[in-house]
Image (cartoon, rainbow, N blue to C red):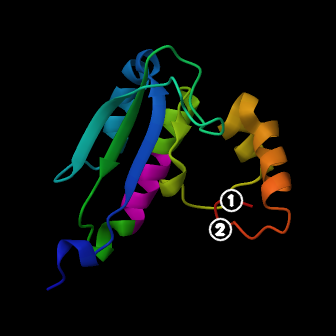
Amino acid sequence: MASPWERAHPYIGAFIGVDALVQVLPAVLDTLPLGEGHRGIFFVATNGVPPLMALPEAEDVVFFSVIYPQIVPLFLDDTLAAFQCAGNLLVEGGGRRYVADWLGDRGEDDWREHFGSRYSRWVESKRRFDPHGVFRSVLLP
């Protein structure tokens, strides 16, 4: 039998304003197949944030996250679809996804929305510090 960490353990995380989270949290929780998993809401200090950290425009920001430590293969596709839906709800509510768990293809419009007013600085930083595209992944073009 596989140990929990040998199985898929998808997670979702987003930075979102407190007021926005209050509005979208019921729909997000209804979307997720909650069971044995870990859920957390952590306040974020927004002063001194790195210049390219994508945070929502909000006075009080939290990091909302959910992780399931062991998804059996039979339920993985449904779980990933639920996480995609929850992620969309968080972004539509004004949140910014935590890039490490942001699966799937992302185009320029997605990155523009993600970085908001910091998008042009991100593009310029990529051009200046990584002109040959060495530091990239399927997430970062």
Choose top left, top right, bottom left or bottom right for residue 111.
top right
Q: Residue at x 74, y 71 (%)?
A: 134
Q: Which residue is mark 1?
A: 140
Q: Which residue is mark 2?
A: 137
Rendered view: 97 above or below 61: below
Label 1 neighbourhood size at 10 Å, few (<14), some (14-19), many (20+)?
few
Number of labels in the image equals 2
Q: Position of residue 51 (x, y in %)?
A: 65, 35
Quarter of the picture holding the C terminus: bottom right
Q: Residue at x 84, y 69 (%)?
A: 132
Q: Residue at x 37, y 59 (%)?
A: 79
* Horizontal side of residue 104 vs 107, given as left or right: left
Q: Secondary structure at mark 1?
A: loop
Q: Does the stretch in magenta take in 51? A: no
Choose top left, top right, bottom left or bottom right for residue 96.
top right
Could you tell me if the residues under marks 2 and 1 are in contact, i.e. CB atoms within 8 Å? yes
Compare residues 36 and 5 and report the one nearer the observer: 5
Q: Which amino acid type is marked by label 2?
A: Ser
* Horizontal side of residue 39 vs 135, given as left or right: left
Rendered view: 45 above or below 90: above
Q: Position of residue 9 (x, y in %)?
A: 32, 65
Compare residues 85 and 90 and report the one nearer the observer: 90
Q: Does the stretch in magenta take in 83? A: yes
Type of secondary structure dominating the magenta stretch: helix
Give the magenta-colored segment's residue range: 77-85
* Horizontal side of residue 104 vs 122, given as left or right: left
